[in-house]
Image: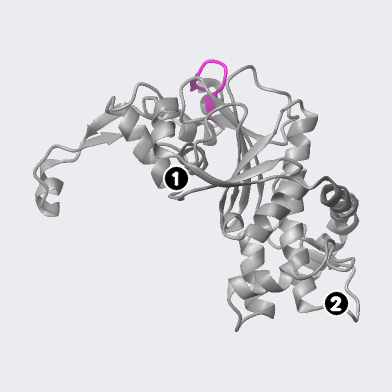
Amino acid sequence: MEYSDAAGTLLLDPETNEWAEDIASDLELGDIFPPLVTSHCRVGEVTDALLTELGLEEEIAVFAGGADNACGALGAGVINEDQTLCSIGTSGVILAPENSEGLNYGHNIHYFKHVLPDTAYAMGVTLSAGYSLNWFKETVFPETSFEDMIEAASKTNIGANGLIYAPYIQGERTPHGDATVRGSFIGLSGSTTAGQMARATIEGITYALYEAIVFMRQAGKSIDHIISIGGGAKSEFWLQLQADVFNTKVSKLNYEEGPGMGAAMLAAVGLEWFDSFEDCAKQFIKTSNTYTPNEDNHQRYIQYFEIYRQVYAQTKDLSRQLLAIEQN
């Protein structure tokens, strides 16, 4: 097993980079731990039988690979401490590499080994990012394309006429770690439109990601430039909204292949086609547009964000009470 996936088991000692045998012993796990290798380590070759089945003649090397988000970050060129990844898929991720001594995140941020040697990453996750938007579309805009729904959202004002969406429809991860909290719209009125609800959903997802950024910045992490990938990078409106909420430059890639690109880059470096991951990234990764934050918009969003941050505390007990009724 390579280090980025090993870190995800919570059984890797981050100081020694070895399996935490004391924890394994306490849990009576037995001898289940494979040797640890780097992500770009050549671990074997495709078998002759499989080569024949696939109609291939040349030997094909197999490399260790890496965890999905770590490979996704590499595939977006996020390899240095001055870069941050925002990935909006089913869940939403803020990921920032760290080459030096880890900051104190108070155990509220994931802290794992990167696929890069001698590098870790801090990561905040909101569980229902694209999942929230898909749920909203299927519920409110079933006959409308995503593009038209986002267009309707873009024609409304910041704050969606005083409407806030908390994307806790599957519980929440960062920074609350709460499986029982549920989502909500706060501020619905008789004048609320479907477009405003769409905008509130997009803003709420972005606030959830910004909450992780704020948490990292408060711990001393500098976040000045974000590479945005996934569904949130398919709309200029949403990219500008990210820049305005995050108050930082946000760039999108010329093309986006996700974790598969990172895996290919691991193989390319493992084959010694490149001297370093930096050289590999220069060849593989190109950004297109960069969106600059509007300070006036940011200040406007912050007013709503500060209210958004209060929603969890105000609704978590109500969510538990509702779930208790449903479970009885």
Between 42 and 250, the one nearer to me in the picture = 250
Which of these two is toward me, 8 or 202?
202
Residue 4 placed where, x, y %? 48, 32
Helix, strand or loop at label 1? It is: helix
Residue found at x 79% / y 69%: 156
Read off the magenta span: 11-19
Residue type pointed to by label 1 = Pro
Q: Quadrant of the N terminus?
A: top left
Q: Secondary structure at mark 2?
A: loop
Residue 113: percent from left, percent from top? 53, 28
Between discs 1 and 2, the one toward the N terminus: 2
Could one spot residue 168 in this view of the protein? no
Nearest to viewer (mark 1 / mark 2): 2
| Dot 1 alpha-carbon crowd within 10 angstroms: few under 14, some 14 to 19, many 20 or more | many
Query: Which label sits on residue 22?
Result: none
Q: Which residue is mark 2?
A: 192
Q: Nearer the viewer, residue 277 or 288?
A: 288
| Colouring scheme applied when the structure was drawn | one colour
Q: Amino acid at mark 2?
A: Thr
Task: Place residue 33 in its image quadrant.
Answer: top left
Marks 1 and 2, how far apart at CA: 39 Å
Work out whether 45 lies above or below 20: below
Left or right for 199, reference 127: right
* Residue 273 is one of the magenta-drawn residues: no
In the displayed structure, would residue 314 be above or below residue 97? below
User: Looking at the picture, how far across and down is residue 3, in whole percent?
Assistant: 46, 28
User: Disc 1 marks which residue?
Assistant: 259
